[in-house]
Image: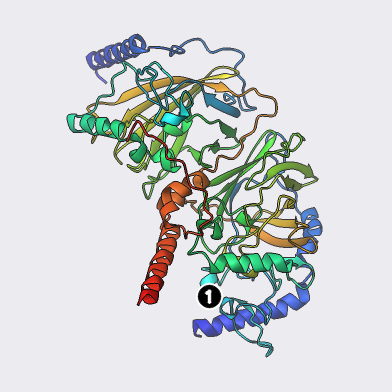
């Protein structure tokens, strides 16, 4: 069987499965009951280890109005794609979520983005040659953000979770970030401290780690990578409020779900549900991004060369 | 082992020990009686959890240095260089002659050469004594995380046996082990891009760093490092400094994501001009 055919068959199976199991992520509480997680010495449910988030499930349910290059296939005859194009993922054979999209709420699998935010995203992406601030913070090597840093990027997909008394830490392979979440109930930092990744405060609800994040700056974006399709480069405001839930439902799976609410940017809160898979042999490499960032200066210098050529043409 | 050989080895080891002690210039003396107040984890290991920071000016210059004017005239006393005593055992960094010349050149061209100016990852051991806090997360099982506020740098120290690092990186590969109450971290796989301080002290990719974190009291760690690089130095050399616990109420690592502070410097001439730019005032640099 050719690879392309295999992909189509897989996609068909996916669509079939999805129609039956659209509610799968909602079952986290049910699943978690069937498995007792190990505990850390200080009594926290143990989430420690190396996890990856490879998936072939598209971020949103594709729509005819989307940029066609982002999708492949036309199985239902509507012209609608069935999944991310192959270049968006290096792992088309693994870790299907059995849902049509990682966005599970609203039920149509589409993030409710306000029109102004889409316009701003469109402007910025069309003008990356003008100014580095039109690039996403990921391209600038600042951060993939929270929760954006946990959304699949297709590579650099390793995460290590470590726990010590009173803390959970998540080490992100891509862009070498160590996010430290205090569990001691301390209040959020003052409102004048704005952060790219917001200020995380965690607590345990049964076996679920719940993390509340506020205090964002308005310079970041909710998602940074092409794999997040239409949501990539959508701005975030200082009113962004994120609640993440990490529940280990078996030895090899953490169900991660996150509710994103930004009343300036989205018409309603939306939710992503996706698994993190334990992959103990995965080796996290150093993602020294800024140190080798040729993308930003090369893009800008191409823009200036273009401007110069245009001026030359005008002069003639 | 033959008895005579045993004797010789013991004599050598004692001599080395005496030498080490006699050359210790400051800070806690090796081998002192452990403080009974040292915090411990459930399994009896010293508990290094917390937020730590160096006090001092090692990041300006590992060696003895007097105060001097800063690089930017307009900044006056701000960013002038504070004086500091050497954290280098014996104060001498044993450069090979070519490397001593290179260090001098680096010192004179600090602003254009120091990777810190560009917000690059600091490498080891410099990450430890950058003027920003770092947090140690010691897990119940195995790995130890050290997360640095500067540039969101971090490293996971793998305890026990590890494979050699497959590639050289800015932060290297850290392998840890306990020797009594001391966390010993063996760092290999470092690239040649980082410096030791703002005074141009440098190394090659042959750098091998061995760090020793020893709790002295609940809020004080003794930090000793042996630095070895046969391509640059004539012998291994050591630095030593105390690390203090940050005791501020609610202390937490904040963000020092400095990339955005250096983009104008690195890419400013490539930005499309809109005509609305607020011009920078010309700063007068004292140093190149």
Residue A72, given in percent of the width and then of the height, sits at 58, 81
Check the image and name the residue furthest to the left. Answer: B97
Q: Quadrant of residue A93?
A: bottom right
Picture coordinates of residue B222, whole percent (x, y): 48, 19
Above-or-below relation of B250 to B5: below
Please give the count of numbered marks on the rendered protein.
1
Tell me: B173 left or right of A76: left
Q: Nearer the viewer, residue A8 or A87?
A: A87
Asked if one can make out residue A194 in the rendered structure from this viewpoint, the answer is yes
Q: Residue at x 67, y 60 (%)?
A: A275
Which quadrant would residue A110 be assigned to in this image?
bottom right
Q: Quadrant of residue A188?
A: top right
- Determine the chain carrying the residue at label 1: A
Task: Find numbered disc 1 in the image and state the secondary structure of the residue it sits on.
Answer: helix
Q: Residue A86 location in percent, x, y? A: 53, 75
Q: Residues within 10 Å of mark 1 (few under 14, many from 20)?
A: some
Q: Give the side of residue B90 with respect to residue A202, left or right.
A: left
Percent x, y of residue A127: 53, 66
Q: Observer-nearest residue: B7 or A140? A: A140
Question: Which quadrant of the rendered structure holds the C terminus of chain B?
Answer: top left
Judging by the rendered image, the residue that carries numbered circle 1 is A86
Q: Could you tell me which quadrant the N terminus of chain B lies in?
A: top left
Camera-nearest residue between B120 and B271: B271
Q: Is residue B21 above or below residue A26?
A: above
């Amino acid at each position: 069987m050719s690879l392309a055919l295999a992909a189509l068959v897989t996609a068909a199976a996916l669509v079939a499965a999805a129609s039956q199991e659209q509610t799968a992520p909602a079952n986290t509480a049910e699943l978690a009951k069937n498995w007792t997680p190990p505990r850390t010495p200080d009594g926290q449910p143990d989430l420690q280890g190396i996890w990856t988030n490879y998936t072939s499930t598209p971020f949103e349910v594709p729509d005819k109005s989307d940029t066609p290059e982002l999708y492949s296939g036309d199985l239902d005859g509507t012209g609608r794609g069935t999944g991310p194009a192959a270049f968006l993922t290096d792992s088309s054979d693994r870790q299907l979520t059995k849902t049509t999209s990682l966005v599970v709420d609203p039920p149509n699998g589409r993030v409710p983005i306000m029109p102004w935010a889409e316009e701003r995203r469109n402007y910025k992406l069309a003008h990356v040659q003008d100014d580095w601030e039109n690039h996403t913070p990921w391209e600038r090597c600042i951060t993939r953000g929270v929760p954006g840093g946990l959304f699949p990027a297709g590579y650099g997909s390793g995460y290590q979770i470590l726990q010590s008394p009173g803390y959970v830490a998540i080490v992100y392979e891509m862009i070498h970030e160590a996010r430290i979440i205090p569990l001691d109930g301390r209040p959020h930092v003052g409102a004048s401290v704005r952060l790219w990744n917001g200020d995380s405060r965690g607590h345990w609800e049964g076996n679920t780690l719940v993390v509340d994040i506020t205090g964002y700056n308005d310079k970041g974006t909710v998602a940074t990578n092409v794999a997040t399709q239409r949501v990539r480069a959508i701005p975030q405001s200082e009113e962004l409020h994120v609640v993440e839930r990490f529940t280990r439902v078996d030895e090899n799976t953490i169900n991660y779900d996150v509710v994103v609410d930004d009343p300036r940017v989205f018409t309603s809160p939306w939710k992503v549900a996706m698994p993190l898979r334990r992959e103990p042999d995965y080796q996290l490499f150093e993602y020294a991004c800024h140190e080798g960032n040729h993308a930003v200066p090369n893009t800008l210098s191409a823009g200036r060369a273009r401007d110069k050529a245009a001026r030359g043409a005008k002069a003639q | 082992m033959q008895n005579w050989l045993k004797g010789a080895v013991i004599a050598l080891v004692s001599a080395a020990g005496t030498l080490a002690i006699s050359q210790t210039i400051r800070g806690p003396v090796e081998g002192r009686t452990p403080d009974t107040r040292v915090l411990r984890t459930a399994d009896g290991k010293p508990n290094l959890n917390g937020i730590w920071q160096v006090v001092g000016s090692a990041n300006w210059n590992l060696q003895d240095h007097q105060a001097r004017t800063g690089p930017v005239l307009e900044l006056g006393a701000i960013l002038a260089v504070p004086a500091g005593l050497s954290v280098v055992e014996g104060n001498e960094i044993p450069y090979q002659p070519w490397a001593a010349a290179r260090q001098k050149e680096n010192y004179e061209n600090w602003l254009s050469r120091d990777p810190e100016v560009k917000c690059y990852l600091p490498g080891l051991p410099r990450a430890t004594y950058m003027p920003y806090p770092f947090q140690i997360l010691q897990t119940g099982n195995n790995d130890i995380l050290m997360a640095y506020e500067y540039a969101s740098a971090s490293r996971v120290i793998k305890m026990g046996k590890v494979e050699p690092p497959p590639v050289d990186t800015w932060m290297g590969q850290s392998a840890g082990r306990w020797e009594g109450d001391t966390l010993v971290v063996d760092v290999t796989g470092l690239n040649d891009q980082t410096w030791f301080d703002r005074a141009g002290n440098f190394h090659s990719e042959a750098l091998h760093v061995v760090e020793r974190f020893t709790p002295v009291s609940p809020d004080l760690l003794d930090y000793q490092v042996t630095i070895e690089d046969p391509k640059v130095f004539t012998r291994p050399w050591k630095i030593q400094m105390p690390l203090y616990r940050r005791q501020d109420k609610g202390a937490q690592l904040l963000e020092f994501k400095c990339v955005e502070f250096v983009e104008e410097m690195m890419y400013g001439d490539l930005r499309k001009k809109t005509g609305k730019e607020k011009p920078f005032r010309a700063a007068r640099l004292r140093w190149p």
